[in-house]
Image (tube, rainbow, N blue to C red):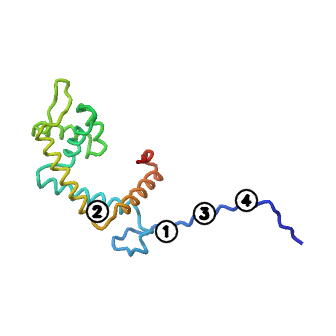
Amino acid sequence: MIMESSTPQPQAHTPRPTTDQAPADPAAADEALATQPIGYWSGLVHAAVTRRLRDEMARIDVTQPQYWVLNQVKYRPEAPSRREVDEALTPLADGPHEIPRVVDQLLHRAWLRTDAADRLHLTDAGEAARVRLRELATGLRAVVHEGVSDEEYVAALKVLRRMAANAGADVGAPRTA
């Protein structure tokens, strides 16, 4: 006769089933999406949204990095130096020389000015341009988000943030509202 122990036995760790990675397929059926590579889809979205935004901005002779600089100058607590703007935005830029060139372009357009301490400030024309660009970006956001609820969007970003962290990116701690 075998006696059962009343002491709980440790549970064996059952590994989570692994989903096979399938080749990227833009026409994959919904049932197959779990097998699709995140890098393909996140890259596709990044490229498509960036291209669309830059195309729209080009129609009014403005670039996305110019918009970044205008926002950086507008939303800093104190007027930034060229170096501070460059350090903040170069990680987003297409190379280490892009942001200094953009600052020069905006100074030439008189959308930025410098003060006696060589700090950057928006001019009235620069603020008007920034507001127009904000409206353009908001309109494009509505087009890109068509058919996607705020809840779905938040869920997608949470998943992407988790995956980025799992892949080793420093995503920081989420802020609570």
Other-residue count near label 4 (Cα within 10 Å), few / some / many at <14 / 14–19 / ≥20:
few
Of 167 and 143, which appears nearest the observer?
Answer: 143
Q: Kindly check if marks 2 and 4 are in contact, taking CB atoms under 8 A apart as contact.
A: no
Q: Kindly check if marks 2 and 1 are in contact, taking CB atoms under 8 A apart as contact.
A: no
Residue at point 20% right, 41% down? 70
Query: At which x and y percent is residue 3?
Result: 86, 68
State which mark lies toward you, 4 or 3.
4
Residue highlighted by disc 4: 10
Marks 2 and 4, the one that precedes in the sequence: 4
Query: At which x and y percent is residue 100?
Result: 21, 37
Helix, strand or loop for disc 1: loop
Query: At which x and y percent is residue 158?
Result: 42, 56
Amino acid of disc 1: Asp
Which quadrant of the structure image shows residue 126? top left
Residue at point 15% right, 42% down? 127
Helix, strand or loop for disc 4: loop
Residue highlighted by disc 3: 15
Amino acid of disc 4: Pro
Left or right, residue 62 beside residue 48: left
Helix, strand or loop for disc 3: loop
Query: At which x and y percent is residue 118?
Result: 19, 27
State which mark lies toward you, 3 or 2.
2
Residue highlighted by disc 1: 20
Marks 3 and 2, the one that precedes in the sequence: 3
State which mark lies toward you, 2 or 4.
2
Marks 2 and 1, the one that precedes in the sequence: 1
Left or right, residue 139 beside residue 171: left
Amino acid of disc 2: His
Left or right, residue 144 beside residue 170: left
Marks 3 and 1, the one that precedes in the sequence: 3
Q: Which labelled disc corresponds to residue 145?
A: 2
